[in-house]
Amino acid sequence: MKYVLLICDDETCSPTMEEIAADPAYHAFSAEVERRGASLGGARLRPVADATTVRVRDGETLVSDGPFAETKDFVGGIDIIECADLDEAIAIAALHPYANRGCVEVRPVWE
């Protein structure tokens, strides 16, 4: 079954790409997901200041800068994994470095 891991954190204190690249915890997480053959892809997202929100109301397209929600925690990236079941997806999510600083939401994919 496929799952998306939504990587959530307070982006005001999130690490830079260089810090992530140098962090052994990220290397260990990536290596474990690859070892399990679970990785289907993923990406880190740019800050919410770079976001654009699109809504259509009564046939009119409304575009605004920034995120939809006003909250401290934002989705900063996603990982797409394939696992035998939810228990395995939770085990992988628990290994993600952001599980120690923010949270990782595990969401099944409609197939």
Image: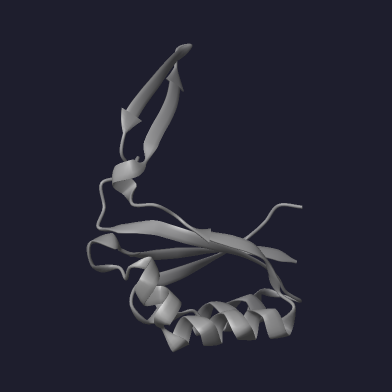
Asked if 53 appears above or below 62 in the picture, the reply is: below
Position of residue 57 relative to residue 26, above or below, is above
Farthest top residue? 59
Q: Is 32 left or right of 61, judged from the image as shown? A: right
Q: Above or below — where is 52 with respect to 21?
A: above
Q: Is residue 28 left or right of residue 67?
A: right
Compared with residue 18, is residue 97 higher up or lower down, i.e. above or below?
below
Choose between 98 and 107: the one closer to the eye.
98
Q: Residue at x 29, y 44 (%)?
A: 49
- Where does the image place residue 2, in percent across and percent down from the top left? 71, 63
Between 39 and 92, the one nearer to me in the picture: 39
User: Quadrant location of residue 21?
Assistant: bottom left
Report which quarter residue 12 is drawn in: bottom left
Rendered location of residue 70, percent (x, y): 25, 46
Q: Residue 79: image x %, image y %?
A: 57, 65
Name the residue: 71% across, 52% down. Answer: 110
On screen, residue 87 versus residue 19, left or right, reads right
Give residue 40's position: percent from left, percent from top: 70, 64
Using residue 60 as the reference point, say whether residue 88 is left or right of it. right
Image quadrant assignment for residue 36: bottom right
**In percent of the image, x 45 and y 12: which residue is there?**
58
